[in-house]
Structures are given as C-alpha cells and as structure tokens.
C-alpha cells in the first residue's frame, strides 16, 4: 500500500502580463493566498427596447463580464527567515503591492517621452498602452482582462513602517472580441475561453422535462 505524504499541491491564481503583439510574458503575479470566493457578474448585451418584437431574442455581442476578488498578502512567514528573504525583510510587502499597482500606471519612461513630445509642440500625443493582463484561475480559465478597480488596505507595519500585511480588492473586466481590434491577442484568448465554456456546457447533465413536472412543451 502506498503511503500519502503531505497535502496535494494547490495551484495558485494570479495575473500574467504579456506583450499583446509578441505574446512575450513580461511578468507573472501570483496571489499569495487564493481568495475564498470570486464574484462574477455578466451583463447581457441585448438589442434593447427598439420596439421591434422580432429582435427580442437577439444579442449584440458577448455579455460584459466583471470579476471581483479579495486577496491577502502577509509577510509573516518570510520574516521568520530573514536571511532567505532579504527583500521582504527590507521592505515588507511593498514589492508585491508595487507589482499590482504598476499594472495601472503608465511607465515613467512613457510619461517622460510624452512630456518631451509636449515640450517640442506635438499636437496629438497617443495615449499610453499597458501590457495585456490575463487573469489565470486554473488551466481552463485564462481571461484577458482590464483592471478597473484596485483597493489596498495595509493592516500591519514593521518598525520602519513597511507594510507587512495587506488586503487587496481587485476589480477586473473581461475583454471580449467587442473590446479589441480584429486579430488582437485578447480576441483569440477570449474565443478560447468561450469555446471552453461551450464544451463544459455540453457535459452538464441533461434533465428531462418530467423533472419540472412537464410532459411536453405547452
């Protein structure tokens, strides 16, 4: 009989930042502790109240899907072994928080470049583009997203006032084919996500009408 050693390895959820043109991975941000719950909201994109009764079942496109989650970051375990975790010992959880926060900042290089363009009289400055963010929650859910909300509550500090424990509330909006140009990496990722959803739907147990007390469609 084989013995069981330890608990099963649990995959971590997180965010991957990629270059939308080359698909090169720029950064991987894992959640230290997986949240206990994730709230997903899907807003139906119906044709609207046009008055045309033939349009009542028609959709304009995929629903607008939003995701909200709360995550915890805690440096307690790392601080027990300071020699093995010099970054945490020096700055607490600042590095992890900075990795999340810089997702919604233009880079300093972009800001400096735009400032230079403004100083030489450029009339139109193109808005700065961020990397494409992918929310990864298992191998079957890899979603292109835009960060819409980021709230951080720092709860404990070391003697140098570095945060050593924090709660992060993250709001995400799934990017669909309606949000990006044709051929964009986010579009193909969204289609893969939708196709996986359709495949899963086909495996759901089929129930007979009798389960609803019906013998046929009226």
Image (tube, rainbow, N blue to C red):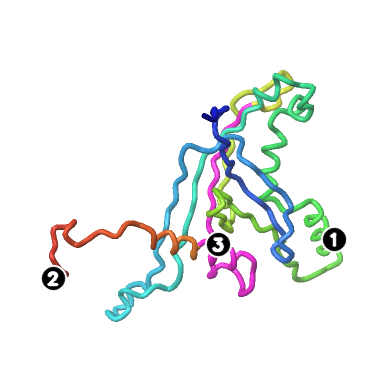
Q: Where is residue 82 in the image (x, y as percent from the top left)?
A: 76, 21
Which one is in front, 45 or 182?
182
> Which is closer to the viewer, label 1 or label 2?
2
Which one is in front, 118 or 19?
19
Q: Which quadrant is home to the C terminus?
A: bottom left
Residue at 79% over, 22% down: 83
- To which residue does mark 2 refer? 218
Q: In this view, does 1 lie to the left or right of 86?
A: left
- To which residue does mark 3 refer? 175
Residue at 73% over, 28% down: 88
Q: Earlier in the sequence, mark 1 or mark 3?
A: 1
| Residue density around tag 3, few if under 14, some if 14–19, many if 20 or more, within 10 Å | many
Q: Is mark 1 on a helix, strand or loop?
A: helix
Q: How far apart are marks 3 and 2 (CA)?
A: 39 Å
Q: Which of marks 1 and 2 is nearer the N terminus?
A: 1
Labels 3 and 2 touching (C-beta < 8 A): no
Whether residue 85 appears in magenta in the rendering, the answer is no
| Residue density around tag 2, few if under 14, some if 14–19, many if 20 or more, within 10 Å | few
Residue at 58% over, 51% down: 135
- To which residue does mark 1 refer? 116
């Amino acid at each position: 009989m084989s013995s069981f050693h330890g608990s099963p390895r649990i995959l971590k959820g997180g965010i991957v930042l990629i270059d939308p043109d080359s698909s090169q991975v720029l950064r991987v941000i894992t959640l230290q502790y997986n949240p206990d719950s994730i709230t997903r909201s899907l807003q139906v994109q119906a044709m609207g109240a046009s008055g045309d009764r033939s349009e009542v079942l028609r959709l304009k496109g995929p629903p607008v899907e939003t995701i909200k989650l709360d995550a915890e970051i805690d440096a307690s375990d790392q601080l027990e072994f300071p020699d093995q975790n010099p970054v945490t010992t020096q700055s607490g959880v600042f590095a992890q928080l900075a990795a999340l926060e810089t997702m919604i900042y233009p880079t300093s290089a972009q800001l400096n470049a735009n400032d230079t363009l403004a100083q030489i009289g450029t009339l139109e400055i193109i808005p700065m583009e961020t990397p494409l963010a992918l929310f990864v929650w298992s191998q079957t859910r890899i979603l292109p997203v835009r960060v819409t909300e980021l709230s951080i509550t720092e709860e404990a500090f070391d003697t140098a006032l570095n945060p050593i424990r924090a709660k992060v509330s993250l709001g995400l909006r799934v990017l669909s084919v309606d949000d990006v140009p044709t051929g964009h990496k986010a579009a193909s990722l969204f289609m893969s996500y939708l196709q996986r959803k359709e495949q899963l739907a086909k495996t759901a147990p089929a129930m007979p009408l009798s389960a609803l007390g019906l013998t046929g469609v009226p």
